[in-house]
Amino acid sequence: MAENENFRLSVRNLNIGFTNGRQVTNVVDGVSFDVLPGEILSLVGESGCGKSASCLAVGRLLNANAVT
């Protein structure tokens, strides 16, 4: 996309991992997308692929054991 676009939402290189003690499990790796005014974005994928985690991260609603 052009850099002068007026995006409603622009996400670049989103990375999310969850910790369980000392182990980190990466669930989202390098996701980027843009949403222009009037556009609708849909995340589609298999169960457990990180769709909900991505939405929660963008909304700053992840719980404390997430590593972004």
Image (cartoon, rainbow, N blue to C red):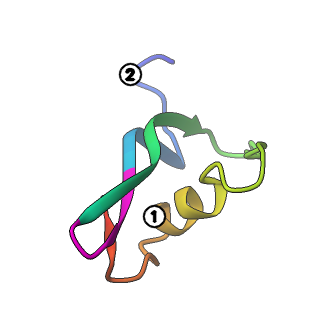
Q: Which residue is more in the foreground, 3 or 42?
A: 42
Residue 31 % position (x, y): 48, 36
| Residue 41 in picture, x, y percent from top left | 73, 45
Classify residue 14 by image quadrant.
Answer: top left
Marks 1 and 2, the one that precedes in the sequence: 2
- Residue range in magenta is 16-22
Q: For the point 67% across and 56% down, which residue is it?
A: 48
Q: Residue at x 47, y 61 (%)?
A: 58
Taking depth in this image into account, of 40 and 6 the one nearest to the observer is: 40
As drawn, 54 above or below 61 = above
Which residue sits furthest bottom? 64
User: In the drawing, what numbered circle is on residue 57?
Assistant: 1
Residue that lies at the very extreme toward the top in this rendered image:
2
Most distant residue in the front direction: 22
* Quarter of the image that includes the C terminus: bottom left
- Neighbor class of circle 1 (other Cα within 10 Å; few <14, some 14-19, many 20+) is some
Magenta part, dominant SS: strand
Which amino acid, mark 2?
A: Glu
Report the side of 35 relative to 21 (left or right).
right
| Residue 17 image point, x, y percent | 37, 57
Residue 34 place in picture, x, y as percent: 55, 36
